[in-house]
Image: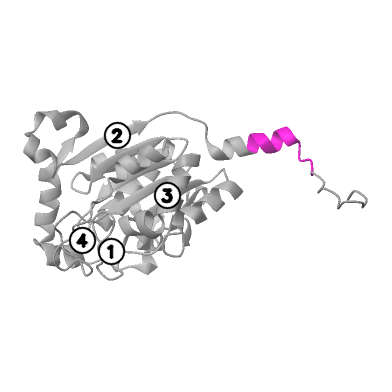
């Protein structure tokens, strides 16, 4: 059994998350995964940006960075380059990672830098105004889509896979034990790893779109979840609303920090002298 308390800053409790929010379920899943792997608190750096999900590091007693909106992956990249020995975990949301942070997301995946991104997807900007996010489903309401969003929404899994991630998976908070196993695999995978976590927001999303009842929202996630290998078994009309779960990408490929270290070793720490101005002497 996991001793959650040893990983938590208990003086920061109670949590600020709304009753029925799924973020606490994800927090416990992260801690179970970390505990099974056997990582010490000093071996982990958890980085977040802005939003409900991004409050997670504030409750966890590891090395933490709470950064600006959309920049969590950029900061995490810097941490990993400076300290490749650390296990770097990014906690972010659908708006934080794929709107203002979209470029950082796709380029970290493209480079295949060894960080684990846990993306909490609640289909809306939950804490920062209730605006429609890049994942808000068509027809669903937000403060910037009072009559329902008509924009096509991102498929986060397809986005990460297309950008070049080494490990890509999706699960819901309705299946927390399956979720912690995917998080464990993501942390252990060398390269850019993403776990998209479908989680309810009863306050900002639920009140606008019904039901706002947290139990019903979690039940809806459970009812619509379909393992990746069984999509073909459900009626075609149900596939559009299905939440397909499981592992979508698990490949081995060159990792950025290792390639960079190899380049440094190859150069042997040599300094390359800058070119001398025309007619002048060379800089020693």
The numbered mark, 1 or 3, whose residue comes first in the sequence reads 3
Residue 161 in the image, given as x and y percentages of width and height: 36, 37
User: Circle 3 — which element?
Assistant: helix
- Mark linked to residue 125: 1
Mark 2 nearby-residue class (10 Å; few <14, some 14–19, many ≥20)? many
SS at circle 2: strand
User: How much space separates mark 3 and mark 2, taking CA atoms?
Assistant: 19 Å
* Residue under label 2: 247
* Image quarter in which the N terminus is found: top left
Dot 1: element: loop
Structural crowding at the residue carrying mark 3, measured as other residues with C-alpha within 10 Å and reported as few (<14), some (14–19) or many (≥20): many
Neighbor class of circle 1 (other Cα within 10 Å; few <14, some 14-19, many 20+) is many
Q: Position of residue 269 (x, y in %)?
A: 76, 40
Expressed as whole percent of the image width and height from the top left, the position of residue 197 reads 27, 48
Comparing marks 4 and 1, which lies closer to the viewer? 1
Residue located beneath label 3 in the image: 105
Q: Residues within 10 Å of mark 4 (few under 14, many from 20)?
A: many
Displayed quadrant of residue 15: bottom left
Callout 2–callout 4 Cβ contact below 8 Å: no
Mark 3 and 2 residues: CB-CB less than 8 Å, in contact?
Answer: no
Q: Name the residue beneath numbered marker 4.
A: 201
Q: Nearer the viewer, mark 3 or mark 4?
A: 3
Question: In 3D space, how far apart are the residues under numbered discs 4 and 1 (Cα atoms)?
Answer: 10 Å
34 and 18: which one is in front? 18
Q: How many marks?
A: 4
Q: CA distance from mark 1 to mark 3?
A: 17 Å
Q: Is residue 269 magenta?
A: yes
Stretch in magenta:
261-271
Residue visible at 7% across and 39% down in the picture: 237
Indicate whether residue 217 is drawn in magenta: no
């Amino acid at each position: 059994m996991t001793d959650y308390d040893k990983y938590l800053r208990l003086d920061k409790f109670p949590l600020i998350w709304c009753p029925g929010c799924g973020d606490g379920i994800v927090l416990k899943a992260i801690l179970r995964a970390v505990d099974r792997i056997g990582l010490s608190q000093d071996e982990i750096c958890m980085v977040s940006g802005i939003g409900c999900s991004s409050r997670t590091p504030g409750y966890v007693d590891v090395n933490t960075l709470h950064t600006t909106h959309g920049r969590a992956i950029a900061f995490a990249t810097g941490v990993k380059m400076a300290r490749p020995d650390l296990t770097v975990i990014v906690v972010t949301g659908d708006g934080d990672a794929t709107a203002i942070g979209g470029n950082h997301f796709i380029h970290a995946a493209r480079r295949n830098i060894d960080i684990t991104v846990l993306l909490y997807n609640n289909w809306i900007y939950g804490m920062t105004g209730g605006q429609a996010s890049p994942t808000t489903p068509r027809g669903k309401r937000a403060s910037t889509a009072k009559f329902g969003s008509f924009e096509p929404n991102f498929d986060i899994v397809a986005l990460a896979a297309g950008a070049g991630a080494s490990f890509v998976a999706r699960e819901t908070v309705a299946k927390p034990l399956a979720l912690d196993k995917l998080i464990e695999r993501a942390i252990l995978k060398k390269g850019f790893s993403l776990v998209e976590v479908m989680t309810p927001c009863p306050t900002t999303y639920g009140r606008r779109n019904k039901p706002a009842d947290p139990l019903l929202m979690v039940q809806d996630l459970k009812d619509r979840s379909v393992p990746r290998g069984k999509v073909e078994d459900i009626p075609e009309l149900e596939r559009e609303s299905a939440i397909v779960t499981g592992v979508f990408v698990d490949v081995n490929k060159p990792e950025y920090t290792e390639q960079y270290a190899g380049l440094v070793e190859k150069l042997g720490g040599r300094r390359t002298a800058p070119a001398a101005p025309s007619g002048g002497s060379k800089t020693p």
